[in-house]
Image: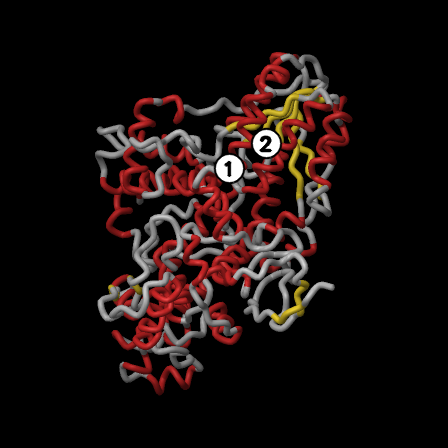
Amino acid sequence: MATKRKVARATSPIRPEPAKRPRQTELVDDSLDSPRPEEQHSYVQREFYPAEMSNERCKQYNNNELPRPIEDLNRALEETKLQRSQIAGGEAVVHWFKRDLRTTDNRALSMASAKAKSMGVPLVCMFIVSPQDYQAHLTSAARVDFELRTLEVMKEDLGERDIPLYVTTAQERKEVPRHMLQKFEEWGAKHVFCNIEYEVDELRREAKLVKSCLEKGISFTAVHDDVVVPPGTLKSGAGKQYSVYSPWLKAWTKHLHEHPHLLETSEPPTHNPPTARTTFPALFSSPIPEAPPNKALPPETRTHLAHLWPAGEHAALTRLDHYLTSKASTYKTSRNFPAVPATAMLSVHFSAGTLAARTAVRCARAANKPALRLETGDPGLVCWISELAWRDFYKHILAQWPYVCMSKPFKYEYSDIEWDHSPQLFAKWCEGKTGYPIVDAAMRQLNTMGWMHNRCRMIVASFLAKDLLLDWRLGERYFMEKLIDGDFASNNRGWGFSASTGVDPQPYFRVFNPLLQSEKFDEAGEYIRKWVPELKGVVGRAVHDPYGRGAGGEAEKSGYPRMVVEHRVQRERALERYKEGLGRGTANVGGGVHN
């Protein structure tokens, strides 16, 4: 008989949909769990995934003793290449949209269009709404809303070329491949194209689809598009994959200069034959479905988000052009100040694929006159290009170290750190009621906009892990459930950096002081006053610490809380926890870096 144990797990008090998550003292069936210490407080969604991976299995991936999902997909594509190339005929060619919601500069879409044109048959596009995939990947309701609004734009754009866009909802994620195969056969499609996603679930699904399609006489082709340089391309002098950004960036830049075709644009799809509308009339008339119940938003919230984040590739290209011509040159000097509108605000478009990173890099290089280079010239543009490169870097990390997709830190030995478990503190962090104004302003921005300034993401992440001593995976999850630009690789990277558990992170003994961060990056308190109205009337430097700088009466009267923890005390506790978790004893913690 399976044993049961009680697991204390903090839960988010605010979210737009009822996410499936065990209550604080829910009994969890242990029959599939191992007694590993790292599973005492696991954050794996057991309704979708097996028990948390062991450190030993992570090591096997690192030692090349286990095949990586990207290797399985590459092998499937390579082993079937000849057979797939011999498949001819068909009454249609299909492009499967996923996180590439654009017609401009889309590798797989361009290939599918060219194939359809060469065969004289229609191109059919499809997108599958999968509520269980949204939940398994913690996709926010705001992100789902953005995708559905984008699909409305795309259906119109594709329709102008007589290309149908078929969008349907598959209630269970296991239905998706089966439904797709059914539609391929129904449409008479013998060639299917898509762009590769680098998370484990998607890589494994595509590897299976290559084979299952071939069994039906269908060629399934998956290509690189979401990154500028494909994972596995860049290797160190020792022939290994990079895990440190600086040398990787040099290799990335050098590779692009030596292989300029990687930045070339892909042609948009051409017009379908006029017969497409009579062949597939139901596809042209079918509506874009509503958001599934688990990701539905109130009408007023949808209107608010549509105002903040216009959907579609046209909005993306307009924003990109405006940024490069008016703001990018000051990016390096102003990017860290949340009160200054200095960033491109394009992350939602990269995440949904309404803008290709390749397009942004190519346009930034063209704007970098007279250098026309990636690494020299205008400091602002060079810095912005290097930030775009980070996105590629973390996609490469996902492919090479797949266990980071499985609730394990890149530095898996950090799994042994003992975290506190306080739903009360976690709730205050979520709601922006910690008594630390810069933290609270940032969290309220997130809860209102579905977005947060990058400097603030680092501040609140460090605060959760190293001040509240709560497991960083709680924050990682909350961000994904709220961010409109939620992207697993980027989000995981940010949390790994701030909690010192990820690839190329800040060292564990570097602990952000939220007060110093506030004074350094929001000196005048503009950002704080915008998002924390209780402190709007507090003047001068007291806005950073009202109770400690003589404005406690005003703060208390307006309902602003006192600090939930004392930073100095928590910093020392955090350093001890990290040292104990890493087996480094109780060495002097006074030498830690205090930012």
Q: Check the picture and name the quadrant holding the C terminus.
A: bottom left
Q: Which mark is residue 518?
A: none
The mark total stands at 2
Report x, y in % for residue 232.
42, 32
Residue type at mark 2?
Asp
Where on the picture, by quarter, is residue 167? Answer: top right
> Relative to residue 247, is residue 124 depicted above or below?
above
Report x, y in % for residue 79.
58, 21
Q: Quick check: marks 1 and 2 in contact, CB under 8 Å?
A: yes
Please rate how many residues cluster around mark 1, counting C-alpha atoms within 10 Å: few if below 14, some from 14 to 19, many from 20. many
Residue 542 at least partly seen:
yes
Where on the picture, by quarter, is residue 563? Answer: bottom left
Q: Is residue 393 left or right of residue 39?
A: left
Report x, y in % for residue 501.
39, 55
**Separation (CA) of disc 1 from disc 2:** 10 Å
Near-viewer residue (491 or 324): 491
Q: Check the picture and name the quadrant holding the N terminus.
A: bottom right
Where on the picture, by quarter, is residue 181? Answer: top right
From the image, tell me which residue sits under label 2.
Answer: 157
Which residue: 72% across, 18% down? 91
Near-viewer residue (3 or 201): 3
Query: Which badge, 1 or 2, comes first in the chain's sequence?
Result: 2
Secondary-structure class at tag 2? helix
Report x, y in % for residue 21.
62, 63
From the image, tell me which residue sits under label 1.
Answer: 313
> Relative to residue 261, is residue 472 depicted above or below?
below
Residue 543 at least partly seen:
no
